[in-house]
Amino acid sequence: MADRRRRHARRRADPARLAAYEVLEAVRADDAYTNLVLPVVLRRHKLTGRDAAFATELAAGTLRRRGTYDAALAACVDRPLIRVDPGVLDALRLGAHQLLSMRVPPHAAISTTVDLVHDRAGRGPTGFTNAVLRKLAQHDLSGWTRRVAPDPRTDPFGYAEVAHSHPRWIVEQLAEAVGETELDDLLEADNIAPRVVLVARPGRAEVAELPGTPTRFSPYGVVLDGGDPAAVPAVAKGRAGVQDEGSQLVALALSRARVDGRDERWLDLCAGPGGKAALLAGLAAESGAGLLAAELRPHRAELVSRALGGADGTLGTVAADGTRPAWAPQTFDRVLVDAPCSGLGALRRRPEARWRRTANDLADLVPLQERLLDSALDSVRPGGVVLYATCSPVLAETAGVVRTTLDRRDDVVLRDAVPLLPEVPDAAGPVAGTLQLWPHRHQTDAMFMALLGRTASTSG
């Protein structure tokens, strides 16, 4: 008996699984962002290579598929999940991902999850954990989906909510934006881990020095073949960065737009954390212009300053409220307003966002987006352009904001943005002349773009 107790006391969780657990715990308890906390946790546990990749997939994949796993776990537990200890529930979700979506043998998935619970919660919940996961292992993912999801013939959105692990309100918003024919493809694309894409910042790095495969559409990007992007010398020195191809295309679209007259002063109105600003600064320098980057929060403005450090084509960084400009009207020739949004276009990269956002958030975001777009239009001179962008395909944040602005102002015209990205197929947006990228079509975030030209007012 004493020997058995000593063996139990020596049980320790596998470091990669423990790291994934700590990510879930930070997301749940501290409202942490997966992409920010994960590198910190990996370093703390000294995980590299295959162990780091395993921990990353385990944490992010569990968060993406949480809705499906919770529905299956609820069928295996004799109480509501809300009454299960939150830490134990985190471990059960990790076990579910290994059993249902990873190539981990069932005995290994169950035993290592039991060890994890023993390490973090003590011996008490280990029997419960073992019993639940053994029940879960009786069926595969498709089997559980058939058992716990609503009938797709009578409740297609309810089925999609469980089968594709998206809250119902998000399913409804995305269905309205993409159409029901492509809905399943879009939802499934949200559950696929995105590629790591690097950007060579013009004037500071060359694409040829970045390890990887050139991106399909952006001439400045490569898809990293593997490894830690921070280990790439150009990234470590700030001459290149990690940036989704869709975000690169936003900067490229603004730089390609035609302006009437001078073209000297560019503005990034909502610049944090600085990725688009760093690319825009290089593009501005190539055409003899300079970029001012503005960001509301001082700590994010500092991140922008770091991203711009050493770049040509910069006019500086200011911590300023974009709705209350710190500059005179009609100062700029080009303005980017990448507005704060629901982020439902980046659910691949931000797996926790689908569980953190609510439908009520749109009531606050849309008026803010409208104010920021108005401010951007006031900041650009007649003959100049504003590119309004969101990392969301939700119609209220895209077509709704653009139409409201056009209805309210007589000094603005919607210009055709489609010719700005001729290399990108099937990207027509919800309003004629706008652009909409999609994860399932383009393997990018679902970036929306509308190009607005400032004219002289026609009112008296």
Image (spheres, rainbow, N blue to C red):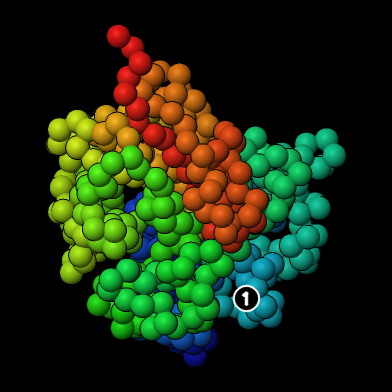
Residue 444 visible, this angle: yes
How far across and down, in percent of the image, does residue 407 sit?
45, 19
Q: Residue at x 39, y 45 (%)?
A: 258
Q: Residue at x 50, y 43 (%)?
A: 417
Q: Is residue 131 left or right of residue 452?
A: right
Where 232 sits versus 172, above or below?
below
Residue farthest to the front, as pictured:
261
Quadrant of the rendered image containing residue 408:
top left
Q: Amino acid at mark 1?
A: Ala
Secondary element under disc 1, as helix, strand or loop, is helix
How far across and down, in percent of the image, does residue 49 sit?
46, 86
> Dot 1 surroundings within 10 Å: few (below 14), some, or many (20 or more)?
many
Q: For mark 1, what is the residue? A: 109
Where 25 sits versus 80, above or below?
below
Quadrant of the rendered image containing residue 43:
bottom left
Q: Quadrant of the C terminus?
A: top left
Residue farthest to the right, as pictured:
153
